[in-house]
Image (tube, rainbow, N blue to C red):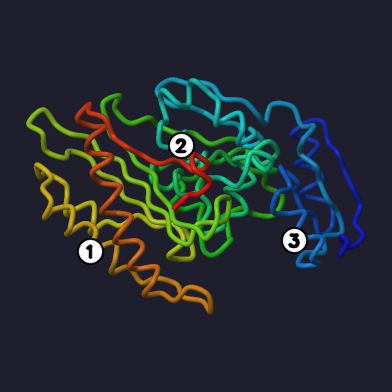
Amino acid sequence: MKAPPFRYHAPRTLDEALSMAATLPSPRLLAGGQSLMPMLNFRLLAPENLIDLNRVEGLSGIRESGDAVVIGAMTRQREIEFSALVKARLPLLAEAIQWVGHRQTRNRGTIGGSLCHLDPSAEQPMVAMAMEATLSIAGPGGRRDLPMRAFALDLMTPALEDGEILAEVRFTPWAASHGWAFLEFARRHGDYAIVAVAVLIELGADGTASRVSITLGGVAATAVRVADAEAALLGTIVSPSDIDAAAACCGSVDALGDPQVPGWYRQRLARTLCARAIPIALARAAGGPASVRHPGNDGTNR
């Protein structure tokens, strides 16, 4: 099928894009287009006006700002994948980005496009949730900041008001000695995850887990932090029984079901992936080696 008719606009500045988004009837923003274009071609969307952000200056790039790493919303996923700064300061994002689609889609896809599309299985919203990222949103009245928890309202429903545009994402890196892991299960390499898990762990001087983040994707309407699983590890010298307890919490989430994947199967995957990811994060936090299979190493991401 072909996209329905629309008027195409290519602003050069953010102010120009904001003016268009606020005044044009039925506008839709085009970032990387890896989700939007198929939705247009399948006639799932029919905007009157398409506003292309690809020529807008100042919306892409990766930089340090104080204690944060700031990534422009139009930054390509491929740039994030090969960024030395992201690898050094945001290793969870560097690992998760390798699971995003295929090289061809990462060449065009943007971090802001993924966050605004807000697919419940998408890797970048998961990392933003896991790391408590702050999103800077530009609008007619200026800028406002939202934590990822407040940005992800519901299934594919970001907290963007009419006329607003996501400008950048701010990540606060964890301590240099923290451990991380990102695992997911999909039918085929490059598919959206059926379930994915992101784990971050910091260890105190006494070896106890002083800070923990455990996030699941694919199980609910948005990526979700599993507070009970985090509490099972906090303040403990993490033992196999603690890992089992945390994994059991992940396996008891109220998981979505559909005709292809029932909820109980997602729960089982969440428990299994959590039990695998925590030891990887612990090994990295302790400074030891951690064996992780990345997508594409052997043609599978299972």
Q: Is residue 129 above or below residue 17?
A: below
Residue picked out by circle 3: 39
Amino acid under label 3?
Met
Quickly name the residue at label 2: 93
Classify mark 3: residues with Cα within 10 Å, few (<14), some (14-19) or many (20+).
Answer: some
Helix, strand or loop at mark 3: helix
Q: Given the image, on which type of amino acid does mark 1 rest?
A: Ala
- Kindly state the secondary structure of the residue where label 2 is placed: helix
Horizontal arrangement in the rendering, residue 234 relative to residue 59 (left or right): left
Distance Cα–Cα, label 1 vs label 2 = 25 Å
Give the residue at mark 1: 248
Ranked by sequence position, the earlier of labels 3 and 2 is 3
**Residue 62 picture location, percent across and down:** 56, 25
Alpha carbons under labels 3 and 2: distance apart: 26 Å
Specify few, some or many for label 2: CA neighbours under 10 Å numbering under 14, 14-19, or 20 or more: many
Q: Is residue 265 left or right of residue 186?
A: left
